[in-house]
Image (cartoon, helix red, strand yellow):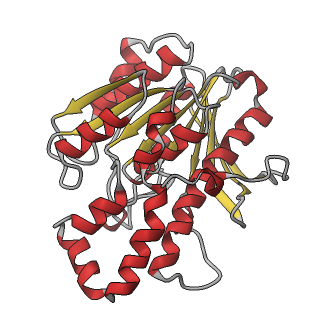
Amino acid sequence: MPDVSLFQYDENAPLNVQVLAERYVGDTIVRDITYASPGGGQIPAYLILPAQSAPQAGVIFGHWGEGNREEFVDEAVILADLGFASLCPDAPFLRPQDHELSLVEVPRLDAQWILDVRRGVDLLLAEFPQLAGRLGYVGHSYAATFGGAVAGVEHRIVANVLMAGFPALSEWTRDTTHPALVRERESTPREEYQAYLAALEPLDAHHYIGQATPSELLFQFARDDEFVSPESGERYFALASEPKRIAWYECGHALNGLARRDRAAFLCEKLGMALPSADILSLLEQAPNPIPLEEWDADEPIT
C-alpha cells in the first residue's frame, strides 16, 4: 500500500550546501557540491550551470543502479548551453553508512533517494527562484523505478522522464529469472528475503505513478533490455496518469543517443525553453552511453 509519510521531511531544515570544487567545461560551470540529506549526512552531487547567464529551467538527474552521479554529466553540460541548471546527486546506497546494512534495511535507502530528490528541488529553488514551475526530473533504471514515487509526490517537478524503470520492483525482484537475482534469492534465508520484499513493496512505483498529474510524463524503454520486459514497460505506462507519452528504442538497458535527443526536446517543450538546435541534437546523439561501474577502465579519467 502507498505510504506518503515515507517521503515527508522538514522543508525548513538548513540545506548546508558546500562547494568542494569548481571547473569549467567550455561555457559551462561544473560544481562538485554536497547538500544535507533528510536521512542524515551529506549528498554528493554535481551542480552544472551555464556560465554566461542565469539558468531558466532545471533538471534533477537520477543515475542507474550500475552507476553514479557521473552518468548524466555529459548530457547536463550540453543542456547548459540551452539554459538549464542540472543537479546530479549520488544515490544513498553509494554513500558511507554507519553500519553494514542488512538486506531488509536496504529499502530505507531507496526511500531516502526520493527524499534527497525533493531536497534537491529545495536547493535549486533556493539558488534560482526563477526556476519555479520549470523543473524536470530524469531517472534511469533505479532512479526511474523510484521515480514513480517522485512523480506522484513532488509536483514542483512538472516534467518527468522515466527511462527503463519498473512499475513494481518488489514483484520483479520476487519473480525474475535474472541469474544475479536468482542467486541472491537462493542465498538469503527465506524469512529475511520475505521481510525485504515487504519493506520494498510500499515504494513500488505503481502506488504513486497514477498521481503524477498535473506533471507530465515521458517513458523511455529499450526493446532489447535484459531487465525490463516490454510487458513491464507497457504496464508502467498504462498505470500512469495523464498527460503521458511513451517511446521505444532499438537498444539495450543503457538506452541510446536518440533517447537523449527525445528527452531534451521533451524537457524544452514542457519547461518553456527553445527547442534544441540541430547542432545540440547532434551533440546529444554523440554523447557516450553510460557504462556500468564494474566495466570502467581504471586508467580512464572520470568526466
Question: Which residue does the image show at 36% across and 80% down from the upper left?
Answer: 193
| Residue 181, quarter of the rendered image | bottom left
Q: Residue furthest front?
A: 1
Going by the image, does 235 lie left or right of 107? left
Q: Position of residue 214 (x, y in %)?
A: 54, 23
Going by the image, does 5 lie left or right of 195? right
Going by the image, does 144 lie left or right of 96? left
Asked whether residue 286 is in view, the answer is no
Task: Say if 2 sits above or below 110 in the image.
Answer: above
- Foreground residue among 256 and 212: 212
Question: Which residue does the image show at 17% across and 72% down from the upper left?
Answer: 179
Question: Which residue does the image show at 53% across and 26% down from the upper left?
Answer: 215
Q: Position of residue 244 (x, y in %)?
A: 39, 24
Question: Which residue does the image show at 38% across and 65% down from the upper left?
Answer: 299
Q: Position of residue 301 (x, y in %)?
A: 44, 57
Q: Position of residue 166 (x, y in %)?
A: 33, 50
Going by the image, does 131 lie left or right of 303? right
- Foreground residue among 78 and 178: 178
- Foreground residue among 267 and 8: 8
Task: Say if 278 sits above or below 157 in the image.
Answer: above
